[in-house]
Amino acid sequence: GQNVLEWIIDFTNGILKGQIPGNEASAFGLYGFTLFLFLFVSNELGLFIQIAVGGKDYVKSPTSDPMITLTFSLATIMLAQFAGVAKLGYKQHFRNYLKPFVFWLPISIFEEFTNFLTLGLRIFGVIYSGEMLLKIIGQMAFSHGIATLIVSVPIEMIWQGFSLFLGAIQAYVFLTLSSVYISRKLEAE
């Protein structure tokens, strides 16, 4: 167990050090580790445990809810802003939004908003659509007796394997993009 934990820590630290310049990556090590581990477990949770009663889902992947993913996205963007202000100071940090010229400000603000949206909605879309497809395949399995069950079981198994892969990739992508957004705020234009 300790070896697996150390491997995950080294893996997430490697992602952070590959994107964030200098020794500043070590300050974000715990955030990167926690973010990756939570997203990975949350992405995979809905593949094994889903409880729905009367069409209402009671247990599913937390990341199939846009509020969860957008909250993590907002936390990342806010952490990047805080780190930029802490390193560069208010004046230099906010001056970066005006470069190369003052009229660039609306584009910079729009870019921050789209970074927030795309970071959160990307992982939500992949996990939610994967769970919906699993639910549809499961309904198909019992729709017309043994014939559809025989066809649906291999498809369900293949899609679950693919969903495991997608959940891991999405946690990796989220952490990588988070470290890119943080590193961009730590450098003066």
Image (tube, rainbow, N blue to C red):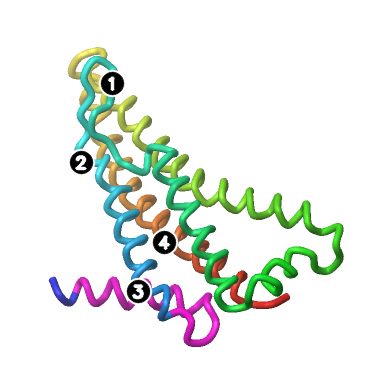
Please state the extent of the stretch shown in magenta in the rendering: 4-25
Q: Which residue is mark 1?
A: 56
Q: Earlier in the sequence, mark 2 or mark 4?
A: 2
Say what amino acid the circle numbered 4 marks.
Tyr
Q: Which residue is mark 2?
A: 48
Three-letter code for the amino acid on which mark 2 is drawn: Phe
| Mark 1 to mark 2 CA distance (whole Å) | 17 Å
Residues under numbered marks 2 and 3 in contact, where contact means CB atoms less than 8 Å apart: no
Residue 113 sits inside the magenta stretch: no
Work out whether residue 116 or residue 150 is closer to the camera in this orientation and state it. 116
| Distance between the alpha carbons at the discs numbered 3 and 4 | 10 Å
Residue occupying the point 50% across, 52% down: 74
Q: Amino acid at mark 3?
A: Phe
Up the image or down, 70 lies above or below 181; here it is: above
Inspect the image, locate mark 1, and give the three-letter code of the amino acid beneath it: Lys
Which residue, as the protein is rendered here, is positioned at the far front? 90
- Give the mark nearest the N terminus, 1 or 2: 2
Question: SS for tag 2?
Answer: helix
Describe the element under mark 3 as helix, strand or loop. helix
Q: Nearer the viewer, residue 145 or 86?
A: 86
Quadrant assignment, res 93: bottom right
Please tell me which of labels 1 and 3 falls first in the chain: 3
Q: Extreme top residue here? A: 144
Q: Secondary structure at mark 4?
A: helix
Marks 3 & 4, CB-CB < 8 Å contact? no
Name the residue carrying label 4: 172
Q: Is residue 47 above or below residue 145?
A: below
Q: Earlier in the sequence, mark 3 or mark 4?
A: 3
Q: Which residue is label 3 attached to?
A: 11
Task: Tell me which label, 1 or 4, sits earlier in the chain.
Answer: 1
**Cα gap from disc 1 to disc 4, whole angstroms:** 30 Å
